[in-house]
Amino acid sequence: MNTTPLVQSFVAHFGEMGSRWGINRTVGQIYALLFVSEKPLNADEIAESLSFSRSNVSMGLKELESWRLVKLQHYPGDRREYFSTPDDVWAIFKTLAEERKKREVEPTLTMLRGAMMEKPASDAERHAQQRMSEMYQLVELVTTWFSDIQHMDVETLQRLMKLGSQVQKVLQFTQSLSKLTGRDTDRE
Amino acid sequence: MNTTPLVQSFVAHFGEMGSRWGINRTVGQIYALLFVSEKPLNADEIAESLSFSRSNVSMGLKELESWRLVKLQHYPGDRREYFSTPDDVWAIFKTLAEERKKREVEPTLTMLRGAMMEKPASDAERHAQQRMSEMYQLVELVTTWFSDIQHMDVETLQRLMKLGSQVQKVLQFTQSLSKLTGRDTDRE
DNA sequence: TCAAACTTTCAGAAATTACTGAAAATTGAG
DNA sequence: CTCAATTTTCAGTAATTTCTGAAAGTTTGA
């Protein structure tokens, strides 16, 4: 496997970023390599390209599978497993967001809910609960919204994106409109 | 410093989550403690509460300062520095998003721009550049949109949030409206 | 059922990251 | 300016995470 300097710098960048993220260097690099590869790669090809041990690649792929970020396929007459990333970048983004939500956001919300249920034993606890509740509301707000977006198709999304800061104007407009029509656009 | 079990579990959770994030356990715990604390704390109080060495707290606070997540204040007649987190959770969220963008997104975009400028030397490179360009567009789209949201005030934001999945409907509605009025709501 | 082809597991080694205590630097009151 | 209070730095150690090679496990075709 010959990797060109172009691909190499991309792969290296993902390695560095990966470790700044929760993901480790190896995993980041494997992902980057698969992302730009023209065709699916098997574990040995990956190991050779990145100069990792075969077992390290196996671990990395397992991790990527747990994130649902790689596709696995077979070729007739070849028993090896070939890996690739999904083509649609938006789909990749959605998967990533979903997975992070499950791993990072949900446990936090659960913990906060638990803490908020406790009877406060002091002024300090009352204050702590108040703060936790503020955090809870924000996180819920953001994730709800995020999941709404997640269910949009690419075209709608791109239109919404292009709309950009006008979202605010649109919002104000629909609100004043709802007063006229009497139909509330607000969920409350 | 006596920390109640309620606060302790909150702090512990942030420690664990912190390491799953890019931030280390110590930093996560210090932040959590400050977040729920009724009043600003000095470094010694933090060190005692969390049983960290004084120097570790110093490092952690420095890191939090670099993320602009803590406020520093002084009390008359007391030379020690007292730390707290901003009150407004939305402001905290914005700061965090801004900082992550600067540290993680910008460098990636720069790298991608660079790679995309290169003259492709092969079919494989052409394909790699195509993929990078797809990634670039997605990241730009999401960050542009994010920064639009960042500039909204809390009230508008909360209305938008409550609107939720109806955003899609609103969007479709405004689009059909623009055909009637001839005024394009689209930036393109 | 066997054996070759391939993948996974795992204990220990290597590398990285976090933490501490001691010492240096800074700060501000007198 | 001096000195005590406070904070920061940093070299060394501890803890954690990553990576490897060897061995065990699995799959499939003959």
Image (cartoon, coloured by chain):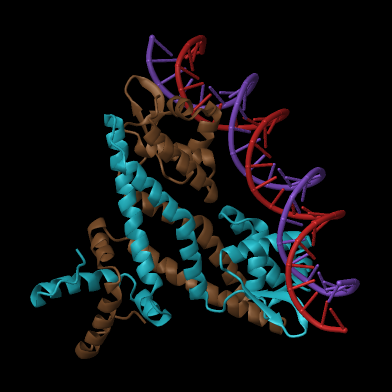
Chain colours: A cyan, B brown, C purple, D red
Residue D30 position within the rendered picture, expressed as x and y whole percent measured from the top left: 87, 84
Taking the image as shown, residue D8 lies to the left or right of residue C17, namely left
Q: Where does the image place residue A185, in percent across and percent down from the top left?
A: 19, 72
- On the image, which quarter does residue B187 sit in? bottom left
For this view, does A139 lie left or right of residue B56? left
Q: Position of residue A50 (x, y in %)?
A: 75, 65
Residue B157 visible, this orientation: yes
Above/below status of A5 relative to B81: below
Is A11 located above or below residue B22 in the figure?
below
Q: Is residue B99 above or below residue B131?
A: above
Residue B23: percent from left, percent from top: 52, 46
Q: Residue at x 63, y 57 (%)?
A: A16
Number of numbered discs overlaid on the protein picture = 0
Q: Is residue A144 above or below residue B181?
A: above
Location of the N terminus of chain A by quadrant is: bottom right
Q: Quadrant of residue B159?
A: bottom left
In the rendered image, the quadrant that contains the C terminus of chain A is: bottom left
Does the image show residue A52?
no
Between B42 and A86, which is closer to the camera in this rendering? A86
Locate residue A70 relative to residue A97 in the image: left or right.
Answer: right
**Residue drawn 24% across the image and 89% down it:** B179
